Amino acid sequence: MLRARDITKSFGPHLVLSGVSLDVKRGEVVCIIGPSGSGKSTFLRCLNFLEVPDAGGVWVDGERVACQEIDGVLWELPARVFARQRASIGMVFQRFNLFSNLTAEENVSLALRLVKRLPRSEARDIARAVLASVGLERFIHHRPSQLSGGQQQRVAIARAVAMEPKVLLFDEPTSALDPELVHEVLSVMTGLAGTGMTMVVVTHEIGFAREVSDRVVFMDGGGIVEQGVSGEVLANPSEPRTKAFLSKIK
Ligand code: ADP
Ligand code: MG
């Protein structure tokens, strides 16, 4: 479903990702863990081209994102094709990134109208249905400032899900939340995993990683140090750096 090959990214002289590769199967839930500054966010952002990798490629369902190789030469894809590809890779951010001047329903329906070109009424109906599915049917007309952090993050998840992405990326979706609000967001994510959504989740929630994800990937220093079946990597890491990291956050 999703394939990243040798993703490399520097900011100025600072090499942040040194050839990171990852394959995610349809319906698989992969958690990425690792210390702050290890390149987790940059890697996620490269997957959907919020950051353009310096080298390497991303494929969704076998189709290369952003460019096309013809006779060994890479060509940029037309903007409309690139837009469709990016819409197939949803993203949920740590700080929700909702439009503060729009209601929950408008936040969810905006991309449906602008990117998918759905008529207003159809976009509204989908927005309402998806907001209901994350338990927010009573809050569709609320603006972000009238919602708790957990509710805002559920709007952000609904906004991503409404686009029917092939894969959904989460960048520390619960790190900005008060502890008592973490559960409601994790439970929406668990439900989503249960529907067969393909998910890549950067998180420090080890319980979620253990119980919900199929695979855990440990990143450090701009690369993948270790990965494997969640239960095994978390209970019995083989790399000293993974052990050291897990002993600190558990
Ligand atoms: P993580 O999400 O694992 O904490 P990040 O991907 O956010 O790590 O950051 C990895 C490194 O890249 C950090 O040293 C960070 O300072 C640097 N970095 C991230 N984004 C930028 C940017 N836009 N410009 C310059 N440096 C950046
Ligand atoms: Mg980060």
Image (cartoon, rainbow, N blue to C red):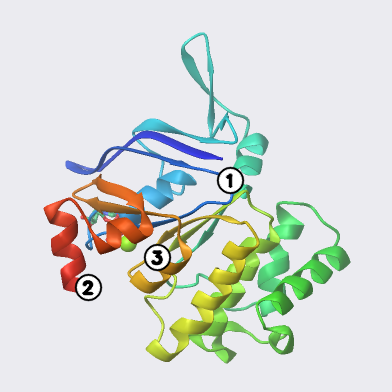
Does residue 205 show up?
no
Q: As displayed, is residue 234 above or below residue 223?
A: below
Q: Residues within 10 Å of mark 2 (few under 14, many from 20)?
A: few
* Residue type, numbered disc 1: Arg
Q: As displayed, is residue 136 above or below residue 189?
A: below
Which mark identifies residue 209?
Answer: 3
**CA–CA distance in space, label 2 to label 3:** 13 Å
Question: In which quadrant is the C terminus drawn?
Answer: bottom left
Q: As displayed, is residue 249 above or below residue 171?
A: below
Give residue 144's position: percent from left, percent from top.
Answer: 57, 83
Which mark identifies residue 249?
Answer: 2
User: Does residue 221 appear to the left or right of 89 in the view shown?
Assistant: left
* Residue type, numbered disc 2: Ile
Dot 1 corresponds to which residue?
A: 26
User: Does residue 136 appear to the left or right of 213 in the view shown?
Assistant: right
Q: Residues within 10 Å of mark 3 (few under 14, many from 20)?
A: many
Q: Which element is circle 1 on? A: loop
Which residue is found at the position 16% from the left and 72% from the top? 248
Q: Are marks 2 and 1 in contact (CB under 8 Å)?
A: no
Q: Is 124 or 231 nearer to us in this picture?
A: 231
Q: As displayed, is residue 20 above or below residue 244?
A: above
Which residue is found at the position 37% from the left and 75% from the top? 175
Q: Quadrant of ligand 1?
A: bottom left
User: Does residue 14 appear to the left or right of 154 in the view shown?
Assistant: left
Q: Which element is circle 2 on? A: helix
Which residue is found at the position 86% from the left and 59% from the top? 119
